[in-house]
């Protein structure tokens, strides 16, 4: 029996490629979607050679929301699982001073991913099956001065995924929200990240694969992040506003 295809939105990212390898290793054909998808030709060949599955490449601009329906229509098959790894960390200081920079962060982390995930959800609902995986962030659990533009966009995406999960709970569609915490990727290169709190892309991919199989709803890749964010959310606002974390 042939495994259902897996669509990876944001297929050029370190986490996206790790996810592609993990699902391909389990026999799933892979649909890699990204801007300038042709640049993934070497990765496509590598995944096919290593895992013996078919990999297709698909052009996707997450800001071109008007193209999403046509993008989904162009896929060789409606995937069984769709994973959205699209995101842009942005620059907090620049976003505070430049509305265009803030808009790009909002649209890249919330508007585009939410609208595309929502369209996929509708198709899964019509079919009566499917798994949606959204990579959000612990940064969305409480606004902090250091990254509240990015964090608020991720908070919106987390809420959107929660709403989808509630709506589709009886429709045969699983919705998994992933909160990775720190991950050692090109996006975080140069940051001084604490080793015990930082996951590797392959670790994220393995945890997501396992959570999908278990029918999970929310996944903290490193469980310690659940404890950390529970504490941070519980700090009274009168104290929190004077902190620098």
Image (cartoon, rainbow, N blue to C red):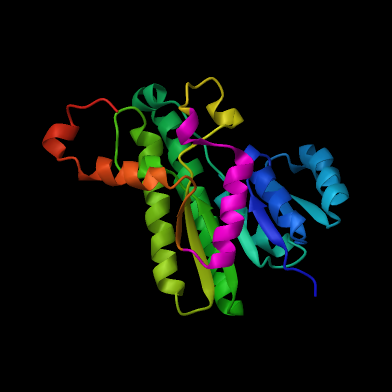
Q: How many marks?
A: 0
Residue 169 image offset from top left, x and y in percent = 44, 75
State whether the magenta stretch is mostly helix, strand or loop: helix
Q: Residue at x 26, y 42 (%)?
A: 231
Instruction: Give the vertical position of 160 relative to 34 (above or below).
Output: below
Q: Residue at x 56, y 30 (%)?
A: 187
Quadrant (top left/top right/bottom left/bottom right) for the N terminus:
bottom right
Instruction: Give the vertical position of 232 relative to 172 (above or below).
Output: above
Residue sitting farthest toward the left? 238
Q: Residue at x 86, y 45 (%)?
A: 45
- Viewed as shown, does residue 240 lie left or right of 158? left
Instruction: Give the vertical position of 169 relative to 100 (above or below).
Output: below
Q: Is residue 233 visible?
A: yes
Q: Residue at x 44, y 44 (%)?
A: 137
Residue 79 image offset from top left, x and y in percent = 68, 65
- Viewed as shown, does residue 89 lie left or right of 228? right
- Viewed as shown, does residue 193 lie left or right of 22? left
Whether the magenta-drawn stretch holds residue 201 is answered as yes
Residue 228 image offset from top left, x and y in percent = 33, 41
Which residue is nearer to you in this view: 149 or 170? Answer: 170
Tell me the quarter of the picture where residue 34 sits: top right
Q: Is residue 59 visible?
A: no
Residue 92 image offset from top left, x and y in percent = 39, 26
Which residue is nearer to you in this view: 101 or 170? Answer: 170
Whether the magenta-drawn stretch holds residue 153 is answered as no
Tell me the quarter of the picture where residue 197 sits: top left
Quadrant (top left/top right/bottom left/bottom right) for the C terminus:
top left
Image: magenta residue range? 195-216
């Amino acid at each position: 029996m042939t495994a259902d295809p897996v669509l990876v939105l944001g297929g050029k990212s370190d986490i996206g490629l790790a996810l592609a390898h993990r699902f391909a290793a389990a026999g799933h054909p892979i649909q890699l979607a990204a801007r300038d998808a042709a640049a993934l030709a070497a990765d496509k060949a590598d995944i096919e050679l290593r895992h013996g599955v078919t990999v297709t490449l698909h052009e996707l601009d997450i800001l071109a929301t008007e193209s999403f329906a046509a993008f989904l229509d162009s896929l060789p098959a409606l995937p069984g699982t769709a994973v959205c790894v699209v995101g842009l960390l942005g620059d907090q200081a620049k976003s505070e001073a430049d509305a265009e920079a803030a808009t790009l962060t909002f649209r890249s982390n919330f508007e585009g991913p939410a609208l595309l995930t929502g369209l996929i959800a509708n198709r899964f609902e019509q079919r009566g099956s499917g798994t949606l995986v959204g990579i959000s962030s612990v940064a969305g659990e409480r606004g902090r001065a250091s990254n509240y533009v990015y964090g608020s966009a991720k908070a919106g995406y987390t809420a959107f995924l929660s709403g989808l999960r509630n709506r589709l709970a009886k429709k045969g569609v699983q919705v998994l929200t992933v909160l990775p915490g720190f991950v050692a990727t090109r996006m975080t290169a140069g940051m001084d990240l604490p080793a015990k709190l930082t996951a590797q892309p392959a670790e994220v991919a393995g945890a997501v694969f396992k959570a999908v199989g278990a029918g999970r709803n929310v996944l903290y890749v490193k469980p310690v992040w659940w404890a950390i964010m529970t504490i941070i959310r519980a700090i009274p606002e009168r104290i929190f506003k004077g902190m620098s974390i």
